[in-house]
């Protein structure tokens, strides 16, 4: 099987709403008309109401009510509103993916997006970009289940799609893994090359030369998301912490355990539990 088979068959590509297509196009445009996109969102009453509900959620902790899309764009920023539209559009496009526990999948992506953003904002990186990558990093799994359901059934019986061992199994069996499919989709949808490269590198960020910090941060975010979702993990799960990846972006383990005096490392406050961290954005999963 070739990755092109998974991505290039038009019958297996989801229909992306026009407003989401415009949002994707905006990643490559420095002169995008924010007003035009606001009009596009406003033309869809359901989407418009959902974005305003998300903007007023506890996640953003606004001191006043965001009443209009213009307010949302001005207060949250275009990048964050774009992320909300993107997440909602992708969830809708892949709503009927066979063989997937979509609630668990989107929860994992949301946990990854929010934990990656939390890490980025506390380590002088672009939090909105990490949120975008967190939402997109697993989209290849959905595409693979749509385009090659029989092959995925065989893999699913061996390793859960959210298991960290899944990438290795896919690579050994198919010759590529789901993050490479996510990157190929991003290329098809004409995302910037920086996003495409970061998506492909997330499973093994240290293999990329030069290092892509965004891939390392989302790798850490995905690791943290798995710990929250799989309580059956053994009690010594901190031993699985990807310390070398954290070190590559100047982090220690202070955000998952009490600081133990690591000179030269960026000390972070403990990350909240992810149910609390993502509270208010649950609508993105539906």
Image (cartoon, grey):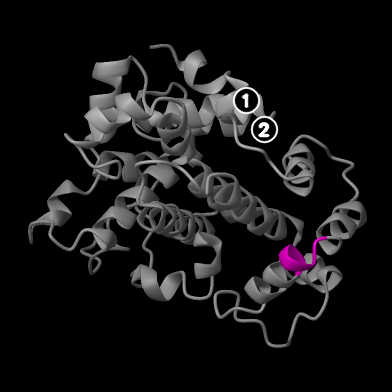
Total marks shown come to 2
Query: Dot 1: what SS?
Result: helix
Q: Is residue 225 left or right of residue 283?
A: left
According to the picture, the residue beneath numbered tag 2 turns out to be: 191
Q: Is residue 146 visible?
A: yes
Q: Is residue 15 magenta-colored?
A: no
According to the picture, the residue beneath numbered tag 1 turns out to be: 187
- Report which quarter residue 225 is drawn in: bottom left
Tags 1 and 2 touching, CB below 8 Å = yes
Chief secondary structure of the magenta span? helix
Query: Dot 2: what SS?
Result: loop
- Please say if 207 is above or below 81: above
Q: Dot 1: few (<14), some (14–19), or many (≥20) neighbours within 10 Å?
A: some
Of residues 15 and 75, the one nearer the viewer is: 15
The magenta region covers 44-48
Q: Dot 2: few (<14), some (14–19), or many (≥20) neighbours within 10 Å?
A: some
Q: Residue at x 17, y 47 (%)?
A: 240
Q: Is residue 69 left or right of residue 133?
A: right
- Report which quarter residue 160 is drawn in: top left
Q: Position of residue 262 (x, y in %)?
A: 26, 56
- Mark number, residue 245: none
Q: Is residue 78 left or right of residue 141?
A: right
């Amino acid at each position: 099987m070739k990755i092109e088979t998974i991505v290039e068959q038009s019958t297996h590509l989801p229909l992306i709403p026009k407003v989401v297509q415009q949002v994707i196009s905006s990643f490559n445009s420095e002169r995008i008309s924010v007003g035009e996109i606001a009009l596009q969102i406003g033309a869809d009453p359901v989407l418009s109401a959902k974005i305003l509900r998300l903007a007023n959620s506890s996640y953003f902790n606004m001191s006043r009510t965001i009443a209009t899309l213009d307010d949302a764009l001005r207060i949250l920023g275009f990048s964050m509103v774009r992320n909300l539209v993107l997440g909602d559009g992708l969830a809708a496009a892949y709503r009927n993916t066979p063989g997937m526990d979509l609630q668990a999948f989107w929860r994992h992506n949301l946990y990854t997006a929010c934990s990656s953003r939390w890490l980025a904002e506390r380590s002088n990186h672009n939090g909105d970009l990490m949120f975008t990558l967190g939402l997109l990093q697993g989209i290849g799994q959905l595409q693979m289940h749509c385009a090659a359901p029989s092959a995925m059934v065989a893999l699913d019986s061996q390793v859960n799609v959210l298991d960290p061992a899944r990438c290795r199994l896919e690579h050994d069996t198919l010759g590529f893994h789901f993050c490479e499919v996510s990157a190929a989709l991003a290329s098809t949808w004409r995302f910037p090359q920086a996003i495409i490269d970061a998506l492909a590198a997330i499973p093994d960020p240290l293999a990329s030369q030069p290092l892509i910090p965004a891939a390392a941060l989302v790798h850490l975010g995905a690791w943290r998301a798995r710990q929250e979702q799989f309580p059956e993990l053994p009690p010594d799960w901190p031993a699985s912490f990807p310390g070398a990846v954290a070190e590559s972006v100047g982090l220690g383990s202070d955000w998952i355990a009490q600081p133990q005096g690591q000179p030269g490392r960026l000390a972070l406050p403990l990350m909240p539990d992810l149910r609390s961290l993502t509270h208010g954005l649950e609508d993105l999963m539906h």
